[in-house]
Amino acid sequence: MAGLGDIRDVMRGAIASFFGFGGRLIARTILMIIAGRAYGIEALGVLGQVAAIAEIAGALGVMGLKRGLLDMLSFETENGGRAETRIAEALGVTVFFGFLISTVLLFIWPYILPDHAKVIPLLFFAIPAITFTEVALAAIKHKRIIKWDVWTRGVIEPWGFLLLAVVFLWAGTIDDGLVVAYVGSNLAAALLAGLGLIRAYSLRSLVQSKPRLSNWFFIIRQSAPVGITDLGVMMLRRIDLIVLSIFVGPQGAGLYYMVQQLATVPQKVNALFEPMMSPVIARLHNRKDTGKIRSNLIGICRWVLILQLAISIPMVVFGDYLLSIFGVGFAAGATVLAVILLAELIDGSFATVETPLVFAKPKIPPTLIFITLIIEITVIAALSSIWGVEGAAVGFLIAITCLTVGRLYMLKKHLNINVINAGYILPIVFAVGVLAALAAIRHWIAPQQGLVIIAFFIAGSVGFIYLIKSFALTNTDRILFRALTQRRRRLAAP
């Protein structure tokens, strides 16, 4: 088995991220219940529009340094350079562009939020906070330190958002409370990421790193292809809400945004592996070790598929019950949830294959994203004008499927890596079986039997994982699990 040490690091990062993910999930669930029931569907729709635009603008300001910086720092380390200098230069670039973009948006926000003028000055600081956080956390992950990412993304950001939302609700700030809480959570995340950066590299070494303004152009040129790709990926996941809101208004946008939030639960499975996967692939790319890249991708893609299936199957069957928790009006989005979950399964399972393409063939990912965005905007505009939120969901599924097929084809063509093999057959067969069983059981359960629904929801996920463990583990899986178990025993030994 190639690259066992790298796989251990990736799994270690995934396990650490899982605890942060759990905390984020709890906080976001409580927040969505409060937002749906107390603030209302229209306020949620406004938050969705603001978050979509702010995060697209943030991705533009980051300029691909979330992943591009890892490649640069890996190159510096392999060639005896100083990482601190490049980090300081990258932070300078991204914060500058963050404020520049915020300045432009000051003239645009009044047209988007005509009834929310009071929050516009505060939104000025949201974009620089997002850009700083992304680059600072990327620099920390270069050292394969994951705890600051976990604390920032899993604790401070979601729980800060929740706490501020409760405070503004108590104060009676219904119209703008969610938007202000969103900005406040981004500022808190930036502060913690800055603290983590100082702890990882020390303030003295960063201050004395002697960054040069002349290197900004090099950083921009080096990270531009990755930046276009990351911007496109962000737009791919936000533009559907923006286009949809043109046709259905705040209420339809609020329903779609709520469904998106619920669908991010399985989608975050891929995010568990990403923090350590990117630096691992960056290092292997600089060593030109395609064989180990292939081994890592095959294992991680398959396990992302398995874990996403375990979560998505019961969510599809009991989707209307889940959505009704956030408000009776949201239960109508069950079909939309099923379609988006399928799209997230396709994307999440194979999103990682883009990373080696970003490093080896940097022009390909942005080209694929650009083509996909054209498809997405065109299809969503056409379908949502006819079928509303359901049309937007189908348009998103079509776009994601096209992007995934393009990525897999390019990976095979240019790097001779094929991640799909016979190991996918049994998980998909088991998934269909569990889905059919839960769908049959559902007809015998009344909507008011909440505890019974929860029990079968959990049983579906556990049963699927048990089938995988009993019948679908590969030899590579068994070697990895033995290695991880032995490592835990050595750490626990006196």
Image (cartoon, rainbow, N blue to C red):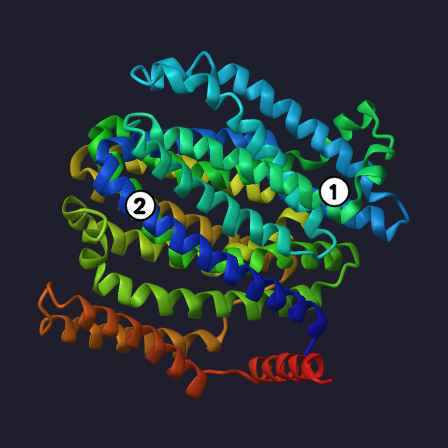
Whether residue 392 appears in this view of the structure is no
Whether residue 403 appears in this view of the structure is yes
Q: In this view, does 225 lie to the left or right of 42?
A: right
Q: Indicate which disc residue 32 carries.
A: 2
* Three-letter residue code for mark 1: Ile
Q: Indicate which disc residue 288 carries.
A: none
Element type where label 1 sits in the image: helix
Disc 1 packing (10 Å; few <14; some 14–19; many ≥20) = some
Q: In this view, does 120 lie to the left or right of 145?
A: left
Question: What is the quadrant of residue 145 in the picture?
Answer: bottom right
Question: What is the quadrant of residue 98 in the picture?
Answer: top right
Q: Furthest-front residue in view?
A: 171
Q: Is residue 315 above or below residue 334?
A: below
Question: What is the quadrant of residue 491 in the picture?
Answer: bottom right
Cα distance between the residues tagged 2 and 1: 33 Å
Q: Which of 450 and 284 is in front in this view?
A: 450
Residue drawn 41% across the image and 33% down it: 181
* Three-letter residue code for mark 2: Met
Residue drawn 42% across the image and 81% down it: 468
Residue drawn 65% across the image and 33% down it: 224
Q: Where is residue 245 in the image (x, y as percent from the top left)?
A: 27, 30
* Dot 2 or dot 1, earlier in sequence: 2
Q: Quarter holding the C terminus?
A: bottom right
Q: Quarter holding the N terminus?
A: bottom right
Numbered-mark total? 2
Residue at the spot of label 1? 198
Q: Nearer the viewer, residue 378 or 432?
A: 432
Q: Is residue 320 above or below residue 206?
A: below
Element type where label 2 sits in the image: helix
Q: Position of residue 302 (x, y in %)?
A: 49, 69
